[in-house]
Image (cartoon, rainbow, N blue to C red):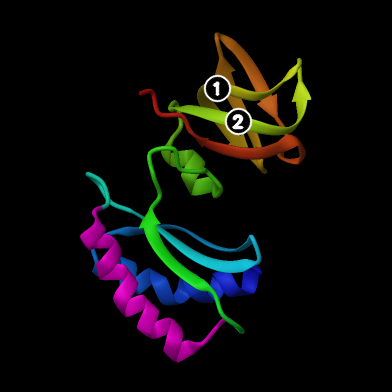
Amino acid sequence: MAKVTDAVTALALPVVERAGCTLWDVEYVKEAGTWFLRVYIDKAGGVSIDDCEAVSRPLSDLLDEADPIEGSYTFEVSSAGADRPLKKPEHFAEFQGEEVEVKLYRPREGRKEFVGALKGYEDGNVTLDVNGEEAVFTKQEIALVRLYPRV
């Protein structure tokens, strides 16, 4: 699916930038038998419904014209969210020192979720400060890393 997301990213980037936003991520996933193409955007001060619409309408037209995806799918444009997943090296660089949650595939020390300050990211490995202790999680054991907003 990388080719689909790469093609959509290339189409989406100029549209997102013209709308005054940044492109956070493009996701093409199958859920409950339906394919979803999701474009996540970000903007200083937050993303509004108007921002999503400003990206969605022209990008939808471009997708119809370029037709990079065979078959039907549901197209969505939304904010990356306060608890956005961190996937790319630039995501990790932007949020150094911020509180993140790491979810693991298998338990470590009897648990699968750890929250701490993001201290490092290298080759997919994530280093956190968890209650004053350094914890390193390997790319192979990490299911998800996301921002951990305090409510």
Looking at the picture, how far across and down is residue 83, in whole percent?
44, 38
Report whether 38 appears left or right of 5.
Answer: left
The residue lying at 38 percent from left, 79 percent from top is 60
The answer to which image quadrant residue 139 occupies is top right
**Label 2's element?**
strand
Looking at the picture, how far across and down is residue 25, in whole percent?
48, 57
- Relative to 37, residue 59 above or below: below
Which residue, as the protein is rendered here, is positioned at the far front? 32
How many residues crowd mark 2 within 10 Å: few (<14), some (14–19), many (20+)? many
Query: CB of mark 2 within 8 Å of CB of mark 1?
Result: yes
Looking at the picture, how far across and down is residue 130, in whole percent?
57, 15
Residue that badge 1 annotates: 115
Report whether 20 appears left or right of 95.
Answer: left
Q: Earlier in the sequence, mark 2 or mark 1?
A: 2
Q: Quadrant of the C terminus?
A: top left
Between 72 and 50, the one lying in front of the other is 72
Looking at the picture, how far across and down is residue 96, in whole percent?
46, 31
- Relative to 74, residue 63 above or below: below
Magenta residue span: 48-69
Asked whether 22 falls inside the magenta stretch, the response is no
Residue that badge 2 annotates: 102
Between 125 and 101, the one lying in front of the other is 101
Between 139 and 123, the one lying in front of the other is 139
The answer to which image quadrant residue 30 occupies is bottom right
How many residues crowd mark 1 within 10 Å: few (<14), some (14–19), many (20+)? some
Asked whether 61 falls inside the magenta stretch, the response is yes
**Label 1's element?**
strand
The Cα–Cα distance between marks 2 and 1, rounded to whole angstroms, is 6 Å
